[in-house]
Image (tube, rainbow, N blue to C red):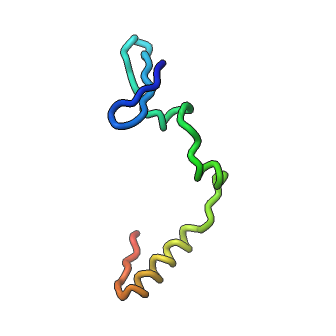
Amino acid sequence: MRLAHSWGDQRVWFYDEAQRLMSLPEAWTSLAPADPFVVLSQGRALTRTDDLLRLVQLAGELGGGTVKEKK
């Protein structure tokens, strides 16, 4: 296994069961550093989806535009 910069990002290179050289983005593996947001939020969100949708509605009203709800 080897970690190297390739294809515009860090990739983990390894041999699969058929001995073919393969690679994955480092972010898809446990070798990547922890995302600070994920660590600090501990899986929690500060807002609910309904609250965010209402905020979008209010922003549209204040901006003079209209916001259509997606279904």
- The tally of labels here is 0
30 in relation to 48, above or below:
above
Q: Residue at x 58, y 42 (%)?
A: 34
Query: Which residue shows up at 66% across the image and 52% down it?
Result: 42
Image quadrant occupied by the C terminus: bottom left
Residue that appears at 43% across and 87% down: 62
Q: Nearer the viewer, residue 65 or 34?
A: 34
Placement of 43 over or under 13, stated as above or below? below
**Would you say 3 lies left or right of 42 here?**
left
Q: Is residue 35 left or right of residue 10?
A: right
Residue at the top extreme of this rendering: 19
Which residue is at 56% across, 46% downward? 35
Residue 33 locus on image (x, y percent): 56, 38
Residue 21 image-quadrant placement: top left
Position in image of residue 66 (x %, y %): 36, 83
Q: Which of 69 and 2 lies nearest the eye of the viewer?
A: 2
Q: Position of residue 14 (x, y in %)?
A: 44, 19
Query: Residue 63, position in %: x, y?
Result: 39, 85
**Where 20 sits versus 49, above or below?**
above
